[in-house]
Amino acid sequence: MKRIAIITGASSGFGKEFALQLDNKIKCIDEYWLVARNEENLNKLSLCLNHKSKVFALDMSKPESIDTLVDAVKSSHAKIKMLINSAGYGKIGKVADMDYNDIYGMTDINCSALAVLSKRLIKYMDENSRIINIASSAAFMPQAGFAVYAATKSYVLSFTRALNAELRKNDIYATAVCPGPSPTNFFHIAEEQTEMASYKKYVMIEPDKIVEKAIIDSINKKDVSVCGVVMNAFNIATKVVPHGIILKFMS
């Protein structure tokens, strides 16, 4: 039986990096399904992979796109070895100044689409399979000026850890990846109206290192993956220092 990996948000950023690294490191996957809106970038990525791949030019914020992908899995009679939920975006800015469409957009794709796709694909997952959901270090606590995005990623972190607890008995393991700032195209979208805090530019980690750590943590069945000394320290700090104090310092 054919075993597949499904990667949403595969046209750039972490999704693209997962496809490239898994293609070289994981031998038990027969085919990669690359999902994103940008068909041209997906086709370029497909040509870079050693394994067979399929391209799905879909907008995962739309329920009909999820229907299309699930139907394709069902008709293929394949087993899913890995599901990488990397589709998502964020916008920097105060809630009062934010466009309604961005609030709906972030919650729709970062939360609803991720949860619904995960739920609908569980029945097609193989034994000893993995779900990797891209959360963020912003999930560790509320963030003024980044409130909606941080809240959606808190959802992803909480959802993934609970999902992992639910699915372990089925030999399926879920990992939430919580990267800090990274030089991907994320900030080209996030900073359309407001620039990120300047200190974040000094703690950036390259996406290949974040993905490499995430793959190792997923293999080791960890429910959370955090890369780098600074982000691990921040994670610990948010657990021992009252969030109100940190919010004053970060504001």
Image (cartoon, helix red, strand yellow):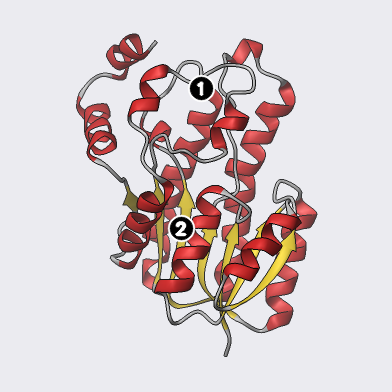
Distance in Å between CA atoms under marks 1 and 2? 23 Å
Disc 2: which residue: 132
Q: 208 or 143: which is nearer to us?
A: 208
How far across and how far down the image is residue 100, in percent?
72, 22
Side of 51 relative to 225 (left or right)? right
Numbered disc 2: secondary structure = strand
Residue under the point 46% across and 16% down: 144
Label 1 CA crowd tier, 10 Å (few <14, some 14–19, many 20+):
some
**One can see residue 85 in this view:** no
| Helix, strand or loop status at disc 1 | loop
Above or below residue 54? Residue 94 is: above
Residue 142 is situated, as x and y percent measured from the top left of the image, at 42, 23
Q: Is residue 179 left or right of residue 47?
A: left
Give the mark nearer the N terminus: 1 vs 2. Answer: 2
The quadrant of the rendering that contains the C terminus is top left
Residue 13: which numbered mark, if any? none
In this rendering, does residue 141 appear at all?
Answer: yes
The quarter in which the N terminus is drawn is bottom right
What is the x, y in percent for residue 115?
Answer: 57, 51
Question: Where residue 17 appears, x then y in whole percent?
Answer: 49, 56
- State if disc 2 and disc 1 touch (CB < 8 Å): no
**Residue at position x 28%, y 12% from top?**
245
Residue indicated by mark 1: 146
Displayed quadrant of residue 122: bottom right
- Residue furthest to the bottom in view is 1
The picture quadrant where one finds residue 185 is top right
Three-letter amino acid code at disc 1? Phe
* In the foreground, 36 or 132: 36
For the image, the number of numbered tags is 2
